[in-house]
Image: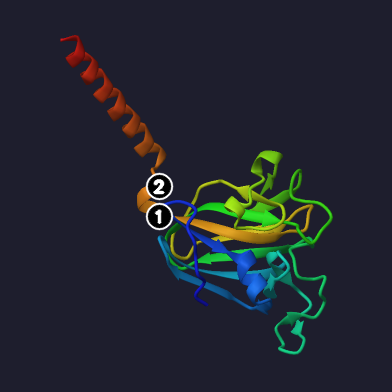
Amino acid sequence: LLLSSAALSAQASFINLMAEANSDERGVTLLDLDGEGLTSFDLDIEGWAGATLVHAYLDDNNAGLGVCQTGLGGGDGEHCIDAADDNVDKSGEFLKLIFNEAMIISGLWFNSNHDAGDMEGNNVAIDGGNYMFTAADADNAGGALAGVNHKYNGLMSFDAGDTLTLGFVDQQFYLSAIEISDPVNVPTPGGLALFGLAMAALGWTRRRRLAA
């Protein structure tokens, strides 16, 4: 599947899973995401329930990507048999991102738009560690996402063959969107430190010249 991607910045690609689900609700064993936007990407996403591979599920009505355990059916055979079983909402359920090339994830958006609440004060297990969303994380990606979404801003670097899991803790959720940044344009901590030293040196040299 080739998903179109938009940019939130000059060096990033924005994969809008909510928009994709709104256009074509369906479940898949493996969601294949490939793009050649401002930043190329090649990753797959699977849905898991414990040690069992189930279905990653694109749910419409401003939801996004969740997990369907109960199997697929309906007229086209692609809809979750249990309409309430389409998000990440049970202990042991998680989405598994599989990276087929090196890339940097600079943002993950989550929502619970089909529930009465939102993500504020609730957790998602990101690669095994719980992250609690706060009011400061509320972010609708400049209007690209509907409802109430919260963004995880942690910068994560992956090599080909790496994986990332996003699991249930205490609040059902959908994955709304993914932002992928260009590794060339994301400075490392060491690079930032060297840049700061260089700027300080330039400033010192300029002051000496002005004093002279």
| Picture quarter with the C terminus | top left
Residue 124 locus on image (x, y percent):
70, 52
190 or 9: nearer the eye?
A: 9
Q: Is residue 178 left or right of residue 160?
A: right
For mark 1, what is the residue?
182
| Amino acid beneath label 1 | Asp
Question: Which residue lies most toward the left here?
Answer: 212
Q: Quadrant of residue 90?
A: bottom right
Question: Which residue lies most toward the top here?
Answer: 211
Q: Quadrant of residue 35?
A: bottom left
Residue 170 locus on image (x, y percent):
79, 52
Residue 173 locus on image (x, y percent):
73, 59
9 or 50: nearer the eye?
A: 9
Relative to residue 200, is residue 137 depicted above or below? below
Badge 2 vs badge 1, beta-carbon distance below 8 Å: yes
Q: Quadrant of residue 41?
A: bottom left
Relative to residue 58, is residue 127 depicted above or below? above
> In percent of the image, x 47 and y 65: which residue is there?
161
Residue 93 locus on image (x, y percent):
73, 64
| Amino acid beneath label 2 | Val
Q: Is residue 179 visible?
A: yes
The secondary element bearing badge 2 is classed as loop
Q: Is residue 208 left or right of residue 51?
A: left
Q: Is residue 68 left or right of residue 41?
A: right
> In percent of the image, x 35 and y 38: which residue is there?
191
The secondary element bearing badge 1 is classed as loop
Q: Residues within 10 Å of mark 2 (few under 14, many from 20)?
A: some
Question: Which residue lies most toward the front here?
Answer: 143
Q: Is residue 51 visible?
A: no
Q: Residues within 10 Å of mark 1 (few under 14, many from 20)?
A: some
Residue 186 - label: 2
